[in-house]
Image (cartoon, coloured by chain):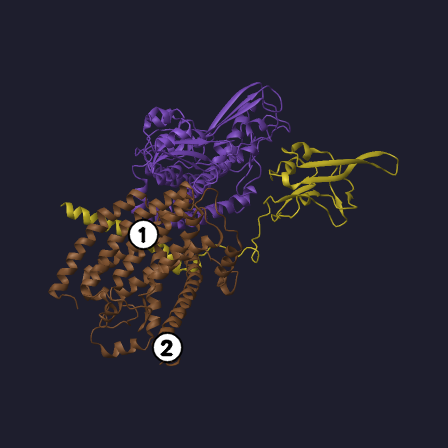
Amino acid sequence: MLSLETITNNINNWLNNHVSSTWATIIEMLIVGLLVIGLFAMLGLILVLMERKVSAFMQIRVGPNRVGFKGSLQTLADTLKLVLKEGLTPKGADKFLFNLAPYVVMCAAMLILAPIAFAKNFQIWDINIGVLYISAISSISVIGILMAGWASNNKYSLLGAMRSGAQIVSYELSAGFSVLCIVILTGSLQISDIINAQQNGWFIFKGHIPAIISFIIFIIAVTAETNRAPFDLAEAESELTAGFHTEYSGMKFALFFLAEYVNIFVVCAIGAILFFGGWMPLHIGNWQGFNQVMDYIPSSLWFILKVFGLIFLIMWFRWTFPRLRVDQLLNLEWKYLLPLSLVNLLLMTVVAIMGWHF
Amino acid sequence: MYRTTDILTNTPNASLSEAGYMVINVGPQHPATHGVLHLVITLSGETIINVEPHLGYIHRSIEKMCESLTYRQFIYTTSRMDYLSSHINNHCCALSVEKGLQIEIPDRAKYIRIILDELTRLASHQLWWGAMAMDIGAITPFFYAFREREMINDIMEETCGARLTMNYMVPGGVMFDLHPNFQKKVKEFIAFFKSKINEYDEILTGNIIFQNRMKGVGIISKEDAISYGCTGPTARGSGVSCDVRKLYPYEIYNRIEFDEIINNGCDSFARYEVRMQEMKQSLKIIEQLIDNIPEGDFQAKTKTVLKLPKGEFYTRVETARGEFGVYIVSEGGTTPYRIKFRSPGFSNLSALNHMAKGNKIGDLVAIMGSIDLVIPDIDR
Amino acid sequence: MFLKNYILEIWNAVKSLLKGMKLTGYYFTHHKEIITQNYPEVKQQLPERFRGEVVLIHDENNEHACTGCTACELACPNGTIKIITKFDVSPEGKKKKALDTFVYHLELCTMCNLCIEACPTSAIKMAQNFEHSVFNRNDLTKKLNKPGSKIREGVE
């Protein structure tokens, strides 16, 4: 069976046979870079369309249905529009920071992709502190948002950026704690170890109630971290018009927009890896027959299915709930999620030490 | 140093920013102001210190225009004021002209007027519900609200010939008779709406986020509501009994059984609850009337050219937003000497500063949603 | 006790959120409930009373019923209608007032229906056309009587 693993190995061998290993690494890096950018473009197109369709069906509408087959090329048309638009820089803005901000946000989103395993042995960089790396990098995007808010010379932008800063910094904590719960079960920070530990069952089943609680906390925290409704205070369109990207237009706005969707993909991928075994097929204990049937489904498909399932969940939240107020947002984190996740961490430690998990 | 009184007496913005406050212009083009309302808000961080509404962006001098229009013609302008309850506005104008002419309109016309008034109120409250949910950040309820509102609009379109600016009430009755499908369609609508109204509670009323956003926010006491001249659900949410339909019944409201909804919560959620209950009361009123519309004329015989006797005539009705009054000063000619409209939105807006002070920016939007502002109504 | 309330509070909150998600989930899976129409392809039949624009009724002989009495012009609140009259000379040599041009400013019209109510000969009516957008504003000023049309016999 042709898998992504064999393709990457073949390319690697071929390059090493034909050029020196330094050049092989450089060429591989270039290929990876191109693939990441390509993935971003694809994700943007697919996720924006998916969001619009999901929202449409929830709102008893049809959604985009003109461009392409059933509106499938709608995002392409929108992108074309955005590219053609003029990128305005407001008077009095800090031009350098204003132009830099979208790229910082974008690069932060790109960097998190590195340790994510898309399929069996198909990973850009299997760093041994993978989980730590992800938590570290995911807080960089807030710098981009603060930059955008400050440099725009707009009070709405500034308010949005400040909200975003407070929000992301606080929700990092409970996201980190729920990730730690899984790390306790595995005993390793490496992504490939975490996935391999779920060989005989995903952590959400293996970890009993603490794993389920930490999954719920994780999904709430990452929704907040990606500035998605009901936590979209940074851009709260009925309060701050568009928050930190009020003054952005054209392609620079598109980068923010794209970064939002890529961030969703990334956090959902992390969620899938930690709680649903990444590319690992659904295995139940020692049921050999069942497990083998599941193995026939390619690992990349498993991964994509899980990630898109989680993305759908986050979209479902967005199109159902009203927005929180800024003080309630922080209340939720500091009074509910943080104590809960601390207790949960303790519970998980007990479970792990006593060996109660499967 | 900054003094509290400085804020209240309109200090120039420079001294405010020196004191560490931020002055932001919300509107006239802002997604939450539902039109061209311009609010100058003074912020300390996220907390609102002062809200100052600026009007005039949609001033069309309707009152002055009316002075050159005849008594038949001026009615249509009121549809352009509170466009969500245009029927009720037209009704009030027709009532005041009838008061001046001292004509009694046929019973059938009265029934038709009341049914259409209540349908308008329902449609208005439905739109308010959707728009309010959108202010809070939930977009989906807006579409559910519009689904039901569309049915009312279709009924209106069939009978009155327009969806929003009806001009259906004329002095002496109504412009056309009811459409033959009217009763059937209204009954269909009532059945449909009753099956869907619990969805409103499921998606929004019961939602914990929504309740936290609404409860204890935008508080205005009973005394303050009276002194600001608040009317309609805004005042009834603070425990003021002010339903014109009950207190000064016009047409046949004294013959109809319905309750005046009063809530003593004084906050945004109380105002929300009042409107939700009012929808049910409107359904009750329509149900009582729809099967009993008497036969007969739909319009009293009036002269082609209407001339009001010298004098002053004031009538008031209860629109979806509060008390709407029409004050006509007549010199005996074919056109009024002066017309003054008392619009509910204006007085309700004046209480906004009182309600919003000390709350967060997000609350300002929720409060504006809960007092249901329609800007062309405030700024005529 | 405190802990019980705390947990109960969270449980009720989550329940209320799930209720909302159930509703949106229902609509997501039930596409039959979709209420929107594909507008330019599927056009709704508008009711006959719908007020879209004023038209002068012409019959198959290109005759209308407008006597040029300007009742509609007087009834109109905002000067939408302008009637230009002329004098027809009958075979007997008698002069008679007749309609020359029925000017209708669609851009000013508020569709209030007062002109139709005022017309003594029911010469005008409201049409159901609502797609009025044009590229040139001048196109909105319309001449309602067709070229060569004349008043129907017997209409006074």
| Chain letter of the residue beneath label 2 in the structure image | A
* Residue bearing mark 1: A224
Badge 1: residue crowd in 10 Å (few <14, some 14–19, many ≥20): many
Which chain does brown denote in the image?
Answer: A
How many numbered circles are shown? 2
**Which image quadrant for residue B297?**
top right
Res B155 visible: yes
| Chain B: colour as depicted | purple
Q: Quadrant of the N terminus of chain B?
A: top left
Left or right of B277, for residue C151: right
Give the residue type at disc 2.
Ser
Residue B338: image location, x then y, percent: 56, 22
Of the pair B59 and B330, the residue shown nearer to us:
B59
**Which image quadrant for residue A39?**
bottom left
Res B206 visible: no
Point out the tag, 2 or 1, that comes first from the N-terminus: 2
Residue B209: image location, x then y, percent: 31, 46
Residue, x 74% and y 50% (percent of image)? C60
Residue, x 37% and y 31% (percent of image)? B18
Of the pair C137 and C102, the residue shown nearer to us:
C137
| Chain letter of the residue beneath label 1 in the structure image | A
| Chain C: colour as depicted | yellow
Indicate which disc residue A342 carries: none
Q: Residue furthest left?
A: A354
Look at the numbered disc 2 and give the secondary structure of its residue.
loop
* Residue bearing mark 2: A20
Vertical comparison of B58 with B212: above or below? above
Give the residue type at disc 1.
Ala
Residue A66: image location, x then y, percent: 52, 60
Look at the numbered disc 1 and give the secondary structure of its residue.
helix
